[in-house]
């Protein structure tokens, strides 16, 4: 499987650009900062996903009656 298959389709998408960014010039501190930011974004996405799943389940339960 090609890594590019998991990237967003738009070449201008910020995530696609970030994934392709050269990490060589970054210092350890800059890499730590980037990792922290990405972990925060993952947590934000997971929270949104959990909300969406819960919301959908609630709606399905409501309309089953």
Image: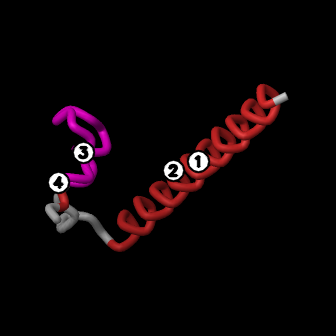
Question: Is 24 left, or right, of 6 in this rendering?
Answer: left
Instruction: Residue at 51% x, 55% y: name it.
Output: 42
Tell me which label, 3 or 2, sits earlier in the chain: 3
Mark 1 lies on a secondary structure that is helix
Tell me which label, 2 or 4, sits earlier in the chain: 4
Q: Residue furthest front?
A: 65
Q: Give the residues in magenta.
A: 5-20
Label ID, residue 16: 3
Instruction: Residue at 26% x, 53% y: name it.
Output: 6
Cα separation between marks 1 and 3: 18 Å
Tags 1 and 2 in contact by the CB under 8 Å rule?
yes
Question: Is 25 left, or right, of 42 in this rendering?
Answer: left
Instruction: Residue at 17% x, 59% y: name it.
Output: 22
* Residue 58 x/y as whole percent: 78, 36
Q: Which residue is mark 1?
A: 44
Magenta-colored stretch includes residue 7: yes
Is residue 12 shown above or below 23? above
Magenta-colored stretch includes residue 33: no
Q: Which residue is mark 2?
A: 41
Pick the residue in front: 16 or 6: 6
Identify the image quadrant of residue 30: bottom left
Identify the image quadrant of residue 34: bottom left
Tags 3 and 4 in contact by the CB under 8 Å rule?
no
The quarter of the picture where the C terminus appears is top right
Question: Is 39 left, or right, of 52 in this rendering?
Answer: left
The quarter of the picture where the N terminus appears is bottom left
Label ID, residue 4: 4
Cα separation between marks 4 and 1: 23 Å
């Amino acid at each position: 499987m090609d890594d590019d298959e998991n990237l967003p389709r738009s070449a201008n998408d910020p995530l696609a650009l970030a994934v392709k960014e050269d990490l060589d010039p970054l210092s350890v501190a800059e890499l730590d900062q980037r990792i922290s930011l990405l972990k925060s974004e993952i947590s934000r996405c997971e929270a949104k996903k959990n909300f969406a799943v819960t919301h959908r389940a609630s709606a399905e339960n409501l309309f089953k009656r």
